[in-house]
Image (cartoon, rainbow, N blue to C red):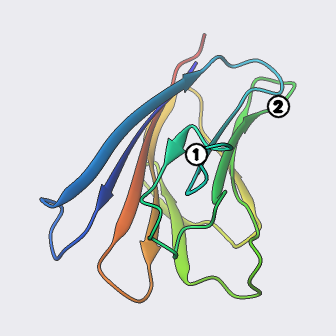
Amino acid sequence: MLDLNMASTSGADDAATVAMLMASAPSVAGAALAVGRDAARCRLVTPADWLFVSRMHLEFRCDETGTWFVTWIRGSQDAPVAEVWLDDGVRRPLPYGGSLPLPRPGSGEVVIADRGGQRRVTVGWFLTTG
C-alpha cells in the first residue's frame, strides 16, 4: 500500500501551508496516483495558478513486481521551471521525464520547488510491505 500526503507551501518558511491532501493505492500492477494542477486527472491537486507545476506533474505507478516508481512527467515545455527531488534519507534529483523507484518498505518525500520563487509542493509517501 502506498500512502501519499501533499502540502503546498508558500513563503520563506513552511508555516504558510496552502493545502494538505491525502491519497492511497494498493501495491498492485498498474495502480497509479498523479499529482498536478488538473483535478480531472490527478488525485492530489496543487493550486491552479501555480504554473511551475504541470497539469500532470508527477505519477506514482506500481509495476508488475509490486515496485512503486515516481516519474516526473514531461510537460509541454522543453525546459522545466521547477526542480524535483526524492528524499528517502538521501536527497536525489528526479530528472525531467525520468523515474526513480521507491524503497519498500520505506518513507520519504518528493519535492517540487519553484525555481522562480519560494513556493513548493511536498508529497510525503509511506510504502508498506503488504
Packing grade of label 2 (10 A; few <14, some 14-19, many >=20) is some
Residue at numbered disc 2: 63
Which numbered dot is residue 116?
none
Horizontal and vertical percent position of residue 75: 74, 72
Figure quadrant of residue 42: top right
Outermost residue on the top side: it is: 130
Q: Upstream in the sequence, badge 2 or badge 1? A: 1
- Tell me the crowding category of disc 1: few under 14, some 14 to 19, or many 20 or more residues within 10 angstroms, Cα based: some
Where on the picture, by quarter, is residue 67? top right
Measured as percent of width and height from the top left, residue 8 is found at: 33, 56
Find numbered disc 2 in the image and state the secondary structure of the residue it sits on: loop
Whether pointer 2 and pointer 1 mark residues with C-beta atoms closer than 8 Å, the reply is no
Q: Which quadrant is home to the C terminus?
A: top right
Which quadrant of the figure has residue 15?
bottom left
Q: Residue at x 63, y 54 (%)?
A: 58
For badge 1, the amino acid type reads Ala
Q: Residue, x 49% and y 32% (percent of image)?
A: 106
Q: Give the quadrant of the N terminus.
A: top right
Q: Is residue 61 left or right of residue 17?
A: right
Left or right side of 113 for 26:
right
Note whether 68 is above or below 80 in the view shown: above
The alpha-carbon separation of the residues under discs 2 and 1 comes to 24 Å
Q: Is residue 98 above or below residue 115?
A: above
Q: Report the residue marked by disc 1.
A: 39
Tell whether 61 sits left or right of 48: right
Badge nearest the viewer, 2 or 1: 1
Which is nearer the eye, 50 or 26? 50
Task: Pick whichever, 77 or 99, lies toward us.
Answer: 77
Q: Position of residue 79 (x, y in %)?
A: 69, 88
Say if 116 sits above or below 126 in the image: below
